[in-house]
Image (cartoon, rainbow, N blue to C red):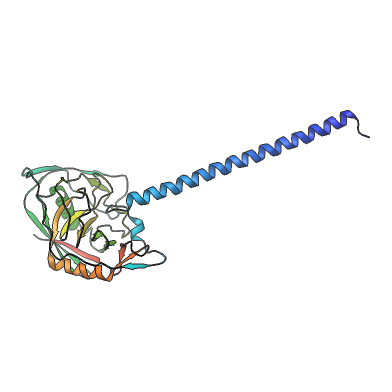
């Protein structure tokens, strides 16, 4: 027959065990809560990242990866009339100062950034992109964006665009072909950036050549050719030249074969017919 003292000792041991058990359960609940919070934050952050980068910028990896279930969207109602190229309401000085700032991300392909300093703001430069669908003829206009033209010419002369692929084609709403990332996934750049050369009067349409970016003053090497409608775009992408009608017709055929989208009707992804840039030759 246990004594009162023995019963009290047994009860105390039982209480101690219960307290330890409760503490362990509470600790586990806290760990689960913290892990759950981290997972939710990560998912929300990923969603924000996708929305923020799902534009004509350096960073649209989702649009450039082949989805598990391919949905091919084809361009329809492509305008045939060339867009009127906007002019600056006030001409730039004969020379402007250009600065190219080294970034934190490494270059997607080895290159030497253009030298900082004054660049002419008049005259045009012809560039021919030799591609898998034929030659694409570009005319770069310094009066529109002298620092952008200087940058594009510098990269072309270094063969930065050679043996790269145009990673993105959009066929719905906005109709553009985007190129200029040596990695071919929409995430790469030259390892430096330069400021925007935009103005409110800029509009976009068939034949316009413009820079892609991931926000203000983040221009690098990615660019896009507007082959159809792009009236929805805001004036935040440097227009620095034009593409001729014969070249646009070649891109039209690519757009008609479609883009590989993540879901039917999205109209944004890799072109089903690859557009590979073999060379970029600058006219003397």
Residue 269 at x, y percent in the picture = 32, 62
Residue most toward the right?
A: 1
Residue most toward the top?
A: 5
Quick check: 207 left or right of 108? left
Residue most toward the front?
A: 77
- Residue 6 vertical position relative to residue 226 in the rendered view, above or below: above
Quadrant for the N terminus in the image? top right
Give the camera-side residue of 97 and 70. 70
Quick check: 140 left or right of 53? left
Give the camera-side residue of 137 and 261. 261
- Residue 219 vertical position relative to residue 12 in the rendered view, above or below: below
Quadrant for the C terminus in the image? bottom left
Residue 204 at x, y percent in the picture = 17, 55
- Residue 236 vertical position relative to residue 73 in the rendered view, above or below: above
**How many numbered marks are there?**
0
Residue 122 at x, y percent in the picture = 6, 49
């Amino acid at each position: 027959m246990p004594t009162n003292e023995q019963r009290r000792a047994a009860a105390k041991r039982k209480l101690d065990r219960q307290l330890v058990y409760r503490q362990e359960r509470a600790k586990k609940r806290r760990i689960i809560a913290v892990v759950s919070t981290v997972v939710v934050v990560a998912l929300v952050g990923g969603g924000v990242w996708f929305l923020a980068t799902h534009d004509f910028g350096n960073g649209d990896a989702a649009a450039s990866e082949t989805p598990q279930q391919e949905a091919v969207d084809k361009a329809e109602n492509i305008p045939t009339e060339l867009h009127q190229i906007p002019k600056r309401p006030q001409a730039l000085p004969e020379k402007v100062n250009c600065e190219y700032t080294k970034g934190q991300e490494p270059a997607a392909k080895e290159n030497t950034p253009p030298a900082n300093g004054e660049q002419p703001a008049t005259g045009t430069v012809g560039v021919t992109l030799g591609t898998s669908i034929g030659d694409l003829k570009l005319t770069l206009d310094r009066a529109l964006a002298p620092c952008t033209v200087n940058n594009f010419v510098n990269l072309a002369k270094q063969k930065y665009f050679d043996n790269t692929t145009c990673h993105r084609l959009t066929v719905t709403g906005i109709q553009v072909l985007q190129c200029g990332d040596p990695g071919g996934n929409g995430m790469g750049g030259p390892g430096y950036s330069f400021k925007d050369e935009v103005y409110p009067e800029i509009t976009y349409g068939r034949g316009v050549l413009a820079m892609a970016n991931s926000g203000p003053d983040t221009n690098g090497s990615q660019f896009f050719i507007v082959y159809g409608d792009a009236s929805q775009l805001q004036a935040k992408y440097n227009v620095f030249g034009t593409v001729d009608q014969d070249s646009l017709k070649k891109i039209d055929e690519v757009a008609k074969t479609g883009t590989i989208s993540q879901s039917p009707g999205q109209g944004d992804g890799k072109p089903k017919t690859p557009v590979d840039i073999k060379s970029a030759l600058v006219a003397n």
